[in-house]
Amino acid sequence: MKLHNAMWPGLVGKGTDEGQEPPISLERMLDLTAAAEVDGQKFDGIDYFLFLPHTNPEASDDEIRQIADMIASKGFNVGSVVAPVWKGTVGDSAMGNSEQRELFLSAVKVACRIAGIFNEHGVRKYGVIRIDSAEFGLDAWGQDPKANTQKIAGTFKEAAKIAADHGERLAAEGEICWAGMHSWKEMLNLLEAVGMPETLGFQADLAHTYLYLMGYNAPEHALLQDGYSEDEFYAAYTQMTDQLRPWTIDFHVAQNDGEVHGAGDHDKTGKHCPADDPNGKLDIVKCSSYWLKDAESRGIQHICWDGCMFPNAVLEDPKTWNTILKTMIQVRDDHLAGKGPHTL
């Protein structure tokens, strides 16, 4: 199982508005990742955000090949890629009007095109294309939850057909900020409504799914309350992962301190913390094992660290990446040793 680092922490929540930190370039993110090493082990690859300033979605084939050359020159593979499905990028809301939904599908086509160039180049041999509903917040969705979930499911079905035609699979991101995907139960409802597990599955992130447990944006689906015991935590974790693990085809290792965080126009999202954060709520290795049970049977060939919206000073600190890499190695080695959730 390969170990990857995400490139989008250099972009998400960054910008040029007052109070925002500047983006970190793709090459700098690659160099920071390449510098990490623990007992001779380095990161094997990266997961990649298909948008500016790292990538122009409208870049020519030759320009994409040049990016592939640069990534390969750092010793990396490309794994999963994130489609630019949001308004202001290429796409728009998956539950919007017909024009908006068509823009969403155009973003999936863009991602398939770029992923295909990476595949032909040889820098990409595994991984999925990540999507979400591109409907930020619950206000519009909440006006008619059932109908709006069906709209999202319909758009996702069309997106899955596009992906299948390109030999790709889509993973729907489990995060509390996306309408119709904001709780473990709503996520499951959406996956079942799409009903195409061979093409569209779930992307689990340890930080985001912790907030699923707490029902942050869906109190009616909370599996835990503040002050829970360790036994209560793992009983709830088992319930959630038993439901979502069969759908899980992409996995992010991460830490969460129980808080919601936002930066720029990306608000109310699960807060990612450094791997050794003293306020972290998760035993990263043990919690990962719940998601990675039988991972290979679901086509998972790599895991990725997600440090989305880390401050730039944290991203620029070499200690950050060595600590993360050490944690990733522990997750991988325990998985390969066959240590499941109840034997750690």
Image: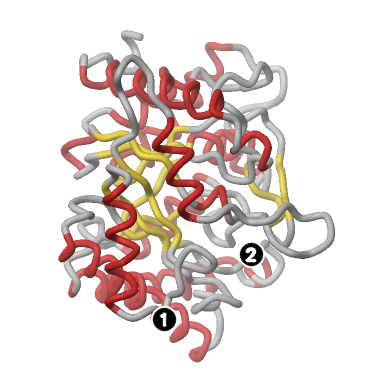
> Residue 299, which numbered label?
none
Q: Give the residue at mark 1.
A: 58
Asked which quadrant contains residue 252, the reply is top left
Q: Marks 1 and 2: in contact by CB < 8 Å?
A: no
Q: How is the image coloured?
A: secondary structure
How far across and how far down the image is residue 56, in percent? Answer: 46, 74
Question: Residues under labels 2 and 1: Cα distance?
Answer: 24 Å
Q: As drawn, is 330 to the left or to the right of 146? A: left
- Residue depicted at 49% across the width and 90% down the height: 98
Q: Give the residue at mark 2.
A: 136
How far across and how far down the image is residue 117, in percent? Answer: 23, 69
Q: Which of 40 and 289 is in front in this view?
A: 40
Look at label 2 and name its amino acid: Phe
- Residue depicted at 43% across the width and 75% down the height: 57
Quick one: which residue is furthest to the right in this view? Answer: 18
Q: Quadrant of the N terminus?
A: top left
Where 158 sits versus 200, above or below?
A: below
Q: How crowded is mark 2: few (under 14 residues within 10 Å), some or many (20 or more)?
A: many
How far across and how far down the image is residue 273, in percent? Answer: 62, 31
Q: As drawn, is 292 to the left or to the right of 120? A: right
Disc 2 element = loop
Disc 1 element = loop
Asked which quadrant contains residue 327, the reply is top left
Q: Is residue 150 visible?
A: no
Q: Is residue 186 visible?
A: yes
**Number of numbered tags placed on the structure image:** 2
Q: How crowded is mark 1: few (under 14 residues within 10 Å), some or many (20 or more)?
A: few
